[in-house]
Image (cartoon, rainbow, N blue to C red):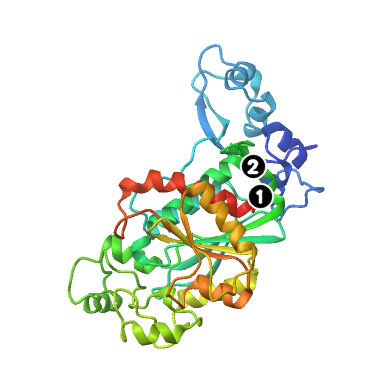
Amino acid sequence: MDVQVRKGDTLWYYSQLFNIPLRFIIDSNSGVNPSGLVVGQTIQIPGYQTEPYRISPGDSFWKIASDRRISIDSLALLNPGVNPSQLQIGQTILIPSRVTERIVNGNQEYDFTVLTNDLEGLLSLYPFMRVETIGNSVMGKDLVELQIGNGAKVVHWNGSFHANEWITSAVIMQFLNDYLLALTNKETIRGLDVNPFYDQITLSIVPMVDPDGVNLVLNGPPEGPFGEQAIQINNGNQDYSGWKANIRGVDLNNQYPAKWEVEQERKPKEPSPRDFPGYEPLTEPEAIAMAELAQARQFEKMLAFHTQGEVIYWGYEGLEPPQSLTIVNEFQRVSGYQPIRNVYSFAGYKDWFIQVYRRPGFTVELGQGVNPLPLSQFDEIYQETIGIFLASLYM
């Protein structure tokens, strides 16, 4: 919600007027000098939107404010050209409306278009969330990283490394919405006050690592050479539900130089709907972007969300730090998912992250069944995963 600065206004006053923590207003207006507001300047108020209100007989600013439990001055701020003593029946004014319901619905086929629309909606409501394009997919789609908070410790989540595991993006985005709601409304999630995390942690999220692959699974092959190549790789089969790879048939979670040669030896030798590790490590732009992001952000811990199995892989060649066991035991406690230290699988993002940084890294396998998991599991998966999201912040 935008407001125009009046003489004497301050960001602190806006925080009191709308009951929004001051740090969220400051961070929503990064180009503004908090101690030098200029009359007429536009300020964004996070966690609010405006709604039109038509004046009825007997209405006054006092009555409207009383009925809506808002401040009279908030009405004056949003309606600078309106004379409160000369309201006209049928006149339309703006009313500030606190956002208390999520706008993200994860329980749907969650392709790149849905993600993009949800991100636009969240950014308009919560402009303190920072967005950076960390690279582009094979087909040129933006690979987006979201950042929330100002803490020195960086916690990273990612989803949809594998195309037919797109439900992970939906789960992440719905929790992100709930987290933003809790921050701006000073609420808890499962009894936990999340506001301290904003100053303690920077949360880094890449909600969809493989947007081209996700769109292929959900919408079929695109027109043009990439679609033609996908049809050829899939041997003309119109069912893409088993497709894990990116649009040109490289499995992004087999792309990392952590015993990549083992995967090369035993996996497909050419582009395939799944498991082809590429002709070399780190050839795909999506995999490269994620490697560069880890280097740039220096994550304290990293969680890669996949499906399926209700297990959490947490080790790699004995290189994981001791605290990984403590963390994964808490993940198990809050979700019921079983920790597995080692598995005969290599070249994944978690493997490479542990090998390079010697920090806690986890592959969290959501749900049970055959990928892509049905949306009938979404609510159960979401409830199981909330505790893992929260524990990754407080552990």
Circles 1 and 2, Cβ within 8 Å, touching? The answer is: yes
Give the residue displayed 67% in from the left and 44% down from the top.
195
Q: Is residue 244 above or below residue 85?
A: below
- Comes first in the chain, label 1 or label 2: 1
Name the residue type under label 2.
Ile
- The part of the image, by quadrant, that contains residue 147 is bottom right
Spot occupied by residue 320 in the image (x, y as percentages of width and height): 60, 70
Query: On screen, 218 above or below 54?
Result: below
Residue 226 versus residue 379 in the image, above or below: below
**In x, y percent, where is residue 284?**
44, 79
Circle 2 sits in a helix, a strand or a loop, which is it?
loop
Question: Split into 4 quadrants, where in the image is the N terminus?
Answer: top right
Amino acid type, callout 1: Ser
Position of 326 compared to 35: left or right?
left
User: Which element is circle 1 on?
Assistant: helix
Q: Position of residue 181 (x, y in %)?
A: 56, 41
Residue 45 is tagged as: 2
* Residue 41 in sight: no
